[in-house]
Amino acid sequence: MSERYDCTECQESLYGQKYVLKEEQPHCITCYEALYSNSCEVCKKLISCTSKDLSYKSRHWHSDCFLCNKCTRSLVDRPFATKGDLLMCTDCYCHEYSAKCHACLKTIMPGTKKMEHKGNSWHENCFICNHCQQTIGTKSFVKKDNNNYCMSCYERLFALQCIHCKKPITTGGISYHDKPWHKECFVCTGCKLQLAGQRFTSRDDFAYCLECFCSLFAKKCISCNKPISGKTKKALFDLQNLHDAARRVHPCMCAFYFLMV
C-alpha cells in the first residue's frame, strides 16, 4: 500500500489534486487560500494562488484591479505614484499634483531636477539669468522686479559702487554724506578702525573715531596734556587752558596753576 500524501490542514488526500507547499508542508488549494491568500484592495475578494498578487506597501490587488484611480488605465508594468491611498499613473499624478514651472508653465515631472525659491518652481534649464540668459543652477542670484539675475549681471547693472574702493555693494553697506560705502571701507582716517555702528565725527569731510579726533585736533590741557573733548568743561584764562579732569586727577598741580593765575 502506497504512503498517504494529505493536506496538512484538512487531511484530505492530495493524490491527483493541485496543492501548494507552505514551509515544506503541503496544503490543498482551498485550505491554502483560506489561510494565506490576501484580499484585493479594490474588490475585497481573495486573490487565489492561481492569480497574480500585486502588492505595494502591504496592500494587495488582483492584476485586473490594479488601475489608475483617475483614468482607470492598468498600472501593471507601468510607473505609478501615490497620493494618500490613491494610486495614479504618472501622467495623472503630474496633472493633478506636480509643480508647474514658473517660466514655461509646463509640468515638472517627478524625478526630474527642479529649482525652488519662495514658493515658485522651475525646470533646471528654465531657471536662468534675465540678462545673460545663462542657467543659474545653485549659484547665488538676486531677484529684482520679479526677475532673477546672476550676481555678475546684477552687480554690473544695478549695484551701488562704493565711493572708496569703487567695487559693487552687494549686501549691507552704509550711506555717509549721501554716498554709498562698504561697511569695511568706512573707517577712521587716522587708525583705520571700522566706524559702522560707532560714534564718530568729521573734519574737512574726513571721518575720525572720537579718540583719533581728540588726539589730532582737540586742544590739550596745559596741566595734564590730555585732549579737552566735548564732554569735558574748559576753563579759559589769559595764559593757559586747564582740563577740569586734571583738577580731579592732579589736585595739587592744578591748584598750583590756579594760584599762579
Image (spheres, rainbow, N blue to C red):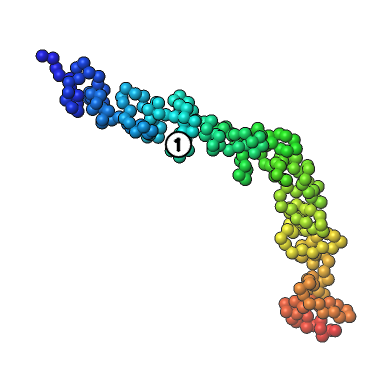
Tell me the quarter of the picture where residue 193 sits: bottom right
Tell me the quarter of the picture where residue 76 sits: top left
- Percent x, y of residue 196: 73, 58
Q: Residue furthest bottom?
A: 259
Dot 1 falls on a residue whose secondary structure is: strand
- Percent x, y of residue 57: 40, 34
Q: Residue furthest top?
A: 1
Side of 147 where 61 appears, left or right? left
Side of 172 where 217 appears, left or right? right
Residue 81 in view in this figure: no
**Which quadrant of the figure contains the C terminus?**
bottom right
**Which quadrant of the figure contains the N terminus?**
top left
Q: Nearer the viewer, residue 14 or 40?
A: 40
Rendered residue at 81%/83% (across/down): 258
Q: Residue furthest right?
A: 238
Q: Nearer the viewer, residue 9 or 157?
A: 9
Residue 194 in view in this figure: yes
- Percent x, y of residue 160: 78, 49
Rendered residue at 34%/23% (across/down): 51
Rendered residue at 75%/55% (across/down): 174
Q: Label 1 is placed on what type of residue?
A: Leu
In the depicted structure, whether residue 152 falls above or below residue 161: above
Rendered residue at 74%/59% (across/down): 195
Crowd around label 1: few <14 · some 14–19 · many ≥20 (10 Å): few
Residue holding disc 1: 86
- Percent x, y of residue 29: 25, 24
Q: Nearer the viewer, residue 44 or 148?
A: 44
Q: How many marks?
A: 1
Q: Nearer the viewer, residue 220 or 101?
A: 101
In the depicted structure, whether residue 70 falls above or below residue 225: above
